[in-house]
Amino acid sequence: MCFSTEASFIGGAIIVAIGVATIRKVHKPSQVVFASIPLFFGLQQIAEGFVWLSLQNPEYVGWLKPATYLFLIMAEVFWPFMVPLAVLLMEKNIKRIKYLKILLAMGLSVSAYFIVCMILFQVTPQINGYHIEYVEGYPKSFKFVVFGFYLIASITPLFISTIKRIYILGILMALSCLVTVIFFTQFLTSVWCFFGAVISVVILWILRDARRKYILGR
């Protein structure tokens, strides 16, 4: 996805469908946030579809700003704290919970930083080849530090948790980010969401397996 208007809308619809299926696998309230991640990814894709549509069609230019900020809010504000929160809610190991709370605090700090940046600085999306580049006027001096905290908050919880097989999701997300940084650095915000489809399927698999064992164990 993330490569055209059609790809974003179609991909978003597919991931939303996976998200609905994932939510239906929830058998504990603590799993709701984790199960919502695919749905979140799908809606994020659809938001970027409207960014594509607005950039390519002058008659839809009025949608550009709201679609751009909706996409960025989901990518930069929600994501840093959504993963640690989702894992924290499901975790039962007291020691791991302490670490996850620290990561959640870090994620919330990153989210707060991006909220301030979106208020104070201009963001201009533009089509560059087959990707959308979000030209952000955020302070460059904090760029790599914030990005590092972003990755730590959104990926590390998946390796800390004692939840079965969730580390596989962590490996997948780490590899996805690495590939994006190496080959699509300037399109990082947009291209990383391409891997949302695969990540969503893994989340569905984890919850489906957990639900099956829960039913058999009753």
Image: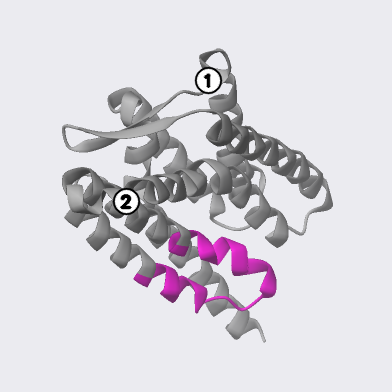
Q: In the rendered picture of this protein, how many numbered marks are placed on residues?
A: 2
**Residue 98 x/y as whole percent:** 81, 44
Q: For label 2, count other residues whose C-alpha is less than 10 Å away and answer few (under 14), some (14-19) or many (20+).
A: few
Q: Nearer the viewer, residue 40 or 85?
A: 40
Give the numbered dot on residue 62.
2
Give the quarter of the image for residue 176. Answer: top left
Q: Which secondary structure lies at badge 2?
A: helix
Q: Give the residue at mark 1.
A: 143
Q: Which comes before the other along the chain, label 2 or label 1?
A: 2
Say which amino acid is labelled 1: Lys
Say which amino acid is labelled 2: Gly
**Residue 119 x/y as whole percent:** 57, 35
Q: Nearer the viewer, residue 61 or 7?
A: 61
Q: Main secondary structure of the magenta part?
A: helix
Q: Magenta stretch?
A: 17-39
Please say whether residue 29 is one of the residues in the magenta stretch.
yes
Q: Residue at x 53, y 19 (%)?
A: 144
Please say whether residue 49 is one of the residues in the magenta stretch.
no
